[in-house]
Image (cartoon, rainbow, N blue to C red):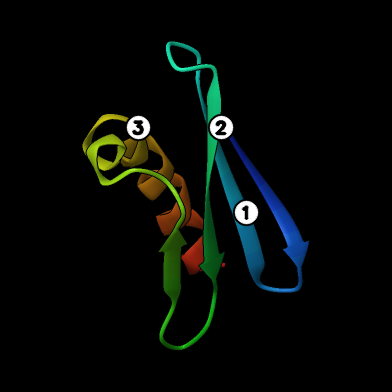
């Protein structure tokens, strides 16, 4: 399950819960002229769980 919250103006937390591991991983997006996506999760999860989040991130960057 993926959840996106705007925690401050133009700063978003993207939380991804991995039920198989019973863990939650967070990425932080800073919307700016040069956006930054900072991940705190395991790199192996990027390909498994981050793709749907990146689609949502693209929508956030357009606003």
What secondary structure is marked by label 1? strand
> Of callouts 3 and 2, which one flags the residue occurring earlier in the amino acid sequence?
2
Q: From the viewer's perspective, is residue 63 above or below residue 21?
A: below
Q: CA distance from mark 1 to mark 2?
A: 12 Å
Rounded to the nearest angstrom, the CA distance separating label 3 from label 2 is: 11 Å
Q: Which residue is mark 1?
A: 13
* Outermost right residue: 8
Task: Give the class, few, some or many, for how many residues have Cα within 10 Å of label 3's Cα (few <14, many ≥20).
Answer: some
- The structure residue drawn at horizontal position 23% and vertical position 38%, both measured from the top left corner, is 44
Residue at label 2? 24
Identify whether 26 is placed above or below 63.
Answer: above
Q: Nearer the viewer, mark 3 or mark 2?
A: 2
Q: Nearer the viewer, residue 19 or 32?
A: 19
Image point (45%, 17%), residue name: 21
Residue closest to the eye, 3 or 22? 22
Direction from residue 57 to residue 3 in the image, left or right:
right
Could you tell me which quadrant the N terminus lies in? Answer: top right
Q: Position of residue 11 (x, y in %)?
A: 65, 68
- Give the side of residue 22 with respect to residue 48, left or right: right
Dot 3 and dot 1 residues touching (CB under 8 Å):
no
The percent coordinates of residue 32 (x first, y second) are 52, 83
Q: Nearer the viewer, residue 22 or 7?
A: 22
Residue 22, quarter of the rendered image: top right
Residue 1 visible, this angle:
no
First along the sequence among labels 3 and 1: 1
Q: Is residue 4 visible?
A: yes
Q: Give the total number of marks visible in the rendering.
A: 3
Q: Residue at x 35, y 40 (%)?
A: 50
Q: Which residue is mark 3?
A: 49
Q: Are marks 3 and 2 in contact (CB under 8 Å)?
A: no
């Amino acid at each position: 399950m993926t959840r996106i919250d705007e925690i401050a103006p133009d700063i978003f937390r993207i939380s991804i819960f991995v039920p198989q591991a019973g863990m939650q991983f967070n990425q932080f997006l800073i919307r700016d002229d040069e956006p930054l996506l900072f991940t705190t999760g395991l790199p192996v999860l990027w390909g498994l769980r981050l793709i749907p989040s990146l689609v949502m991130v693209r929508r956030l960057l357009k606003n």
